[in-house]
Amino acid sequence: MSDEGFQIEVGQAVRRHIVRRSSPLADRGRSVLAYDSPNADPIPVFICQNVMRAIERQSTADKDREVGGVMLGGFYRNDEGSFVEVVDLIEAESATGTDISLTFTHQTWEHIHEQVARRGDEAQIVGWYHSHPGLGVFMSKQDEFIHSSFFADPWHVAIVHDPIYTNWGCFKWADGKLDRAGGFYVFCDKRQARQLREYMKAQVANRQASPRRASVSTERIAGTPSARQPSVWIAIAALLVIQLALAWIVLSRPKPAPPVDEYAAAVRLLSVSDLSGAEDQLRRELAIHPGNADACRDLRALVKATAGAGIVNPEYDGQNLILSTDEQLLRRSGVGGRPSGSIEAKAPGQEAKGGSMNADFAGDDQARVALRDYERASSTRSARLARARAIQSVVNARWSREAIDWLESEEIRQIAYGKIANPVEYAKRYKALSPARKNAVDRILAGTR
């Protein structure tokens, strides 16, 4: 096949030309070292040393919250296969970061697209990066949402860095799923080979296993960590002592304990019948705070419920999560407008893989995005509601009742969003509703549930 004729089709109508280029491993002018074991990766990732150092500087400078950005480079092919090369980055300015999450705002994407335009046609977004200070290397449910929405091309990658435990991970698409790669390569100019060797040696020497268990899926991807050295346990104990001392100084009088983010996220996922996401969050919460009786109670109820035949269904969980996210974004925007502090902007790629977690914001308002997601999920609506009722019959918990109420109102929400995004078609559906259901639609349109 000629160099000029090689192309790859992505999505429905997006074609990208793939340049043929030799891998950095075959370039005598470059020095290349492996981080972990990328050798068996069919599409290896090569990251410039300067980019890796820049990511480390950004995440190390702010260890109290997650930070991130996008990576620039190219997707190339040669006689040996394909590879991804990362040569530059753009920090995610105006992104909203907490100690456990990162949100790309509208302002973030505006800045990114402005910077990409300034760098010319050669600047191609090949993925994104973000930090997990003290949490270990994994992709959370929100991380997966961002990646599926904005980085859906087959070659898009995600780099996760834990600046506290000096750990790195690379996540990529594999057979339609997001999975952790065996590792990645770091390269530099041959004249900087010595600096690269010293830098990579320091990365390995300072690397530690995170003491927190992020989720069941994390363990499946990363494997079981080896036993930690006594020095690591001493460092952890010292850190805990320092944290307790600081807490004693700051708290001059007894105050109620602050809400636990992990548990609050789990409760929200349970209330929209995202069972797998809720289980991950509950296990993570109990790994960090084993004394949380409410989390323990809900996890036991969830495990009991999922023991039934046909209850475990990741597809249903994913659909419920997508619809719940759409609802949150619409509420923030006042219904039908554009949210000011959410994951919302023109995507650098195209629609999400397989039509799920749609984020084609480049010309559609959020109501149209939500309507498409609701229409796609309509075929499983009855089955998802039946599953929620089956769960409620087993555990009869507050969150199981809330999930039923939420799923029962799904058609009402779809009609409300349809009146905004497709008024001609959905006016007929609205007219056929009972007065009570019409009032429910009107409340949603007014920005209330």
Image: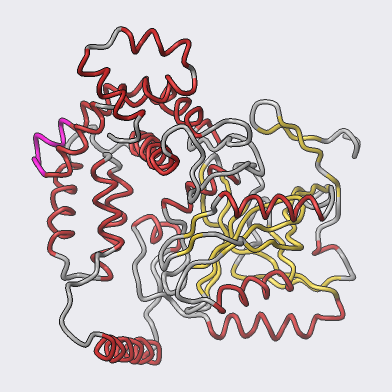
From the viewer's perspective, tell me whether residue 77 is left or right of residue 279.
right
Residue 286 lies in what quarter of the image? Answer: bottom left
From what the image shows, is residue 20 above or below residue 357?
A: below
From what the image shows, is residue 315 above or below residue 380?
A: below
> How many numbered marks appear?
0
From the viewer's perspective, tell me whether residue 58 is left or right of residue 324.
right
State the image coordinates of residue 355 (x, y, percent, origin top left): 52, 30
From the image, which quarter does the N terminus lie in? top right
State the image coordinates of residue 330 (x, y, percent, origin top left): 42, 37
Q: Which residue is most to the front?
A: 446
Asked if residue 210 is among those painted magenta in the image, a careful observer would answer no
Q: Residue at x 31, y 46 (%)?
A: 276
State the image coordinates of residue 328 (x, y, percent, origin top left): 38, 42
Q: Residue at x 24, y 32 (%)?
A: 310
From the viewer's perspective, tell me whether residue 22 is left or right of residue 64.
right
Q: Residue at x 81, y 58 (%)?
A: 23
In-front residue for pair 68/16 = 68
In-front residue for pair 257/55 = 257
Asked if residue 396 is among those painted magenta in the image, a careful observer would answer yes
From what the image shows, is residue 311 above or below residue 140?
A: above
In-front residue for pair 427/80 = 427
Residue 379 lies in what quarter of the image? Answer: top left
Q: Residue at x 38, y 40 (%)?
A: 331
State the image coordinates of residue 200 (x, y, percent, origin top left): 66, 80
From the viewer's perspective, tell me whether residue 240 is left or right of residue 166.
left
The magenta stretch is: 389-397
Q: How is the image coloured?
A: secondary structure
Q: Main secondary structure of the magenta part?
A: helix
From the image, which quarter does the C terminus lie in? top left
